[in-house]
Image (spheres, rainbow, N blue to C red):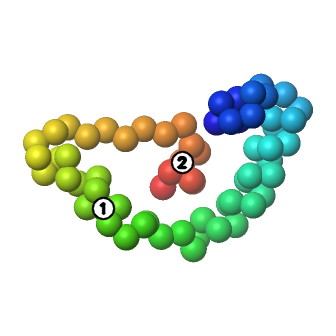
Amino acid sequence: MIPRLTGLDAESEQGQALTKGWEEAFKPMLPDLQATPGAAKLVASPRDLGFNLMLGSSGEDEIVE
């Protein structure tokens, strides 16, 4: 997302600094995160209508889990 939001190369010194800052701020919050109310229903709705649903992420396993 860094290139899209900032125009910086994610592998540049500035891009890596942004990633590191995000990780330092976000990762400690992981144990306390909860799904947004209604999220499960939102994701299940297309499936309930007969659509195949696939979600993808480039996030690390720890974050996606």
- Disc 1 target residue: 40
Which quarter of the figure is the N terminus placed in?
top right
Residue type highlighted by circle 1: Ala
Q: Secondary structure at mark 1?
A: helix
Number of the front mark, 1 or 2? 1
Please provide percent x and percent y for residue 50.
10, 42
- Disc 2 target residue: 61
Closer to us: 11 or 41? 41
Taking the image as drawn, is residue 9 in sight? Answer: yes
User: Can you say whether 25 is above or below 20 in the image?
Assistant: below
Please provide percent x and percent y for residue 13.
89, 32
| The quadrant where residue 9 appears | top right
User: Can you say whether 58 is above or below 7 in the image?
Assistant: below
| The quadrant where residue 3 appears | top right
Please provide percent x and percent y for residue 37.
37, 70
Identify the residue at image location x=57%, y=53%. Answer: 62
Taking the image as drawn, is residue 10 in sight? Answer: no
Identify the residue at image location x=20%, y=53%. Answer: 45
**Distance (Cα) linking label 1 and label 2:** 20 Å
